[in-house]
């Protein structure tokens, strides 16, 4: 059973249609990346999956009892506020020290519970947000450009950690990112979004698609050449740009 099924989803804000007729599904245990230019509706799609954005048309069907963890683009904490990592982890969850330690371990920052949030580096901060999202042992982990502001080595390390999280917990991961060469090569499936799904499939298929290259050029091809994947790609498809625009 799919964790999430999106059917004919259209989202409007006032007179502005940000998503139209989007169909997609997320299966247990897979890593799916959504790519697209600014304003393409990526965050709106995540908000609809969470239930924070109401469809104008279509629907989002969630598996009964689905547990979702969410890592935002950024989170501002007043640097003058004295709050430790352990206390931050308990802000929205009733969590035991053991569960807190386990989540921090899975996120790759086991030694930080007593550290002040204001003293963390950018990479440490994002990993603490990741640990916070893992507290309730989600079936699906959503990441909305979670490495924004990190340098390239920091981003690469974060996404390697994401692969470890999937391996250790078995949760599915849906992530939005602009760092195409890093994220796409770590994905089982890529969805190229530009107000609608214009292309979907394995990273190699999407990277070579005319629709993708029209949006992003060919600069990520070299990095994706290292990608290896050994399952069937029945889900690979890329629409004709003229048909997609209609």
Image (cartoon, grey):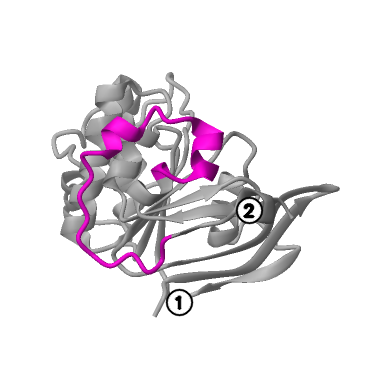
Q: In this view, does 173 lie above or below 37?
A: below
> Given this view, does label 2 or label 1 mark the residue nearer the observer?
2
Whichever of callouts 2 and 1 sits on the residue coming sooner in the sequence is: 1
Say which residue appears at 22% left-offset and 49% top-offset: 163
Secondary structure beneath dot 1 equals: loop
Q: In which quarter of the image is residue 141?
A: bottom left
Query: Where is mark 1, residue-wise?
Result: 63
Q: Which residue is drawn at 56% across and 48% down?
A: 193
Camera-side residue of 166 and 112: 166
Which residues, given as a range, are shown in magenta? 207-236
Q: From what the image shows, is residue 234 above or below residue 97?
A: below
Q: Which mark is residue 196?
A: 2
Quadrant (top left/top right/bottom left/bottom right) for the C terminus: bottom right
Q: Quick one: label 2, few (<14), some, or many (20+) residues within 10 Å? A: many
**In the image, residue 124 lies at what x, y percent?**
27, 29
The quarter of the rendered structure image containing the N terminus is bottom left
Residue 103 in view here: no
Report helix, strand or loop for mark 2: loop
x and y, in percent, of residue 206 in the image = 42, 48
For marks 2 and 1, give the CA distance: 23 Å
43 over 112 or under it: above or below: below
Overall secondary structure of the magenta section: loop
Q: Residue at x 47, y 36 (%)?
A: 73
Q: Is residue 224 magenta?
A: yes
Q: Going 54% across and 61% down the picture, which residue do you hit?
A: 49
Q: Nearest the camera: 196 or 3?
A: 196
Say which of 138 and 23 sits in front: 23
198 vs 68, left or right, is: right
């Amino acid at each position: 059973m799919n964790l999430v099924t999106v059917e004919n989803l259209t989202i409007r804000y006032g007179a502005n249609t940000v998503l139209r007729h989007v169909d997609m599904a997320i299966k247990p245990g897979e890593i799916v990346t959504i790519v697209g230019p600014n304003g393409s509706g990526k965050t709106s799609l995540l908000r609809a999956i969470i239930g924070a954005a109401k469809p104008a048309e279509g629907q989002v069907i969630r598996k009964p009892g689905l547990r979702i963890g969410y890592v935002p683009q950024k989170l501002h904490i007043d640097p003058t506020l004295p709050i430790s990592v352990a206390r931050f982890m308990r802000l929205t969850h009733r969590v035991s020290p053991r569960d807190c330690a386990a989540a921090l371990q899975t996120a790759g920052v086991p030694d930080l519970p007593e550290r002040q949030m204001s003293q963390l580096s950018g990479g440490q901060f994002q990993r603490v947000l990741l640990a916070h999202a893992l507290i309730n042992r989600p079936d699906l982990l959503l990441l909305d450009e979670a490495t924004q502001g990190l340098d390239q080595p920091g981003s690469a390390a974060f996404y390697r950690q994401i692969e470890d999280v999937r391996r250790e917990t078995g949760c599915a991961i849906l992530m939005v990112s602009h760092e195409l060469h890093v994220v796409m090569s770590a994905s089982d499936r890529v969805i190229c979004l530009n107000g609608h799904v214009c292309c979907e499939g394995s990273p190699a298929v999407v990277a070579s698609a005319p629709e993708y290259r029209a949006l992003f050029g060919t600069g990520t091809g070299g990095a994706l050449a290292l990608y290896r994947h050994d399952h069937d790609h029945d889900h690979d498809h890329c629409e004709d740009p003229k048909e997609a625009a209609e």
